[in-house]
Image (tube, rainbow, N blue to C red):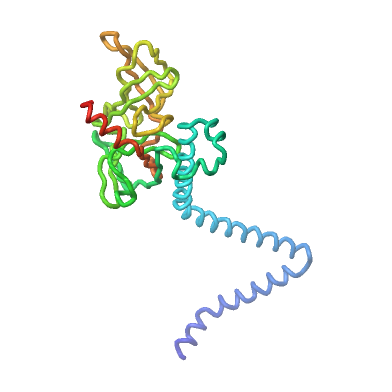
Amino acid sequence: MYRLIEFIKRIYVLVLFLIIEGVALWSYASSSPYTEAKILSRTTAVGGAISSTIGDVEHFFSLAENNRLLTERVAELSEQLAVYDERGMADIVGGGDLVDSLDKEHMGHFRYREARTVSMTTNRLRNFIVLDKGTEEGIAPDMGVITPNNELVGYVVSCSSHYCVVQPMLNVEFSTGGRLVDNDHVCMIIWPGDSKYRVEAQDISVYAEPREGMIVEVRSERLPKGVRIGTIESCELNSTKSAYSAVITIAADMSRLDNVLIVENTHYGELEALKQELNL
């Protein structure tokens, strides 16, 4: 009891000041309709700012889930788009019910699964990416990996039950086929190891006449048509003047990968078996 009395003695001036200040503010606020309206508008503005801040914080923490849902939707739409590319619009519409034609049992032979980046490197000669999908989700080596914007990332090279390792374009052991969109001439894509923003196209035909700004897409049985690698930044003839080589600016931002799509060609095993049979 003695300590309580001593504590009250120490703070009674502050308490008295707060009481008087409160009474004064209340008196001022209720003195006229104008002051009531002004105070109401100020308190509403403050309350709105606080609510907006809370909403922004909640939105920030929900971004990861929203991105996951959007990537799943992109995967579904990519499968549907593959049907149009394989059959043609006329065949689908002429077949009767459009919804039935997009049924999973009648889809094209490319399947899309969303995944998220667990870890990755970009500063080595042999970089890698780890994704949060593995054999339990149907992932296997040689599946393609692209961004939701249909840009090449790399190929799956190894899997565990719940994870897979991707060999990205930023790996000196990486190679894939490429295609110049303007004229369908093919090339080989490699990474020289000198920049995380560029790869190199080799063995471009002299008849291709490559030039700055040309779009280069993937040409591989592991991925559907239309997956972009990047655009030609510069090109030159080799020393024998028999082929061009070109520097390509990578379309995907390889240092900021988060949600990606894993692409499966369900006919890939059949193609590989045929190649082995013919010793190709």
Q: Residue at x 45, y 53 (%)?
A: 65
Q: Residue at x 52, y 43 (%)?
A: 100
Q: Tell me the quadrant of the picture where the C terminus can be found.
A: top left
User: Position of 97 compared to 265: left or right?
Assistant: right
User: In terms of image quadrants, where is residue 112?
Assistant: top left
Compared with residue 208, is residue 51 higher up or lower down, i.e. above or below? below
The count of marks equals 0
Q: Residue at x 26, y 8 (%)?
A: 240
Compared with residue 278, is residue 142 higher up or lower down, i.e. above or below? below
- The residue most toward the right is 33
User: Position of 220 compared to 280: left or right?
Assistant: right
- The residue most toward the front is 95
User: Could you say which is closer to the camera, residue 229 or residue 141?
Assistant: 141
User: Position of 186 compared to 43: left or right?
Assistant: left
User: Could you say which is closer to the camera, residue 61 or residue 179?
Assistant: 179
- The residue most toward the top is 241
Q: Residue at x 29, y 49 (%)?
A: 135
x and y percent of residue 201 in the render? Answer: 32, 22
User: Could you say which is closer to the camera, residue 112 or residue 249?
Assistant: 112
Compared with residue 1, is residue 87 higher up or lower down, i.e. above or below? above
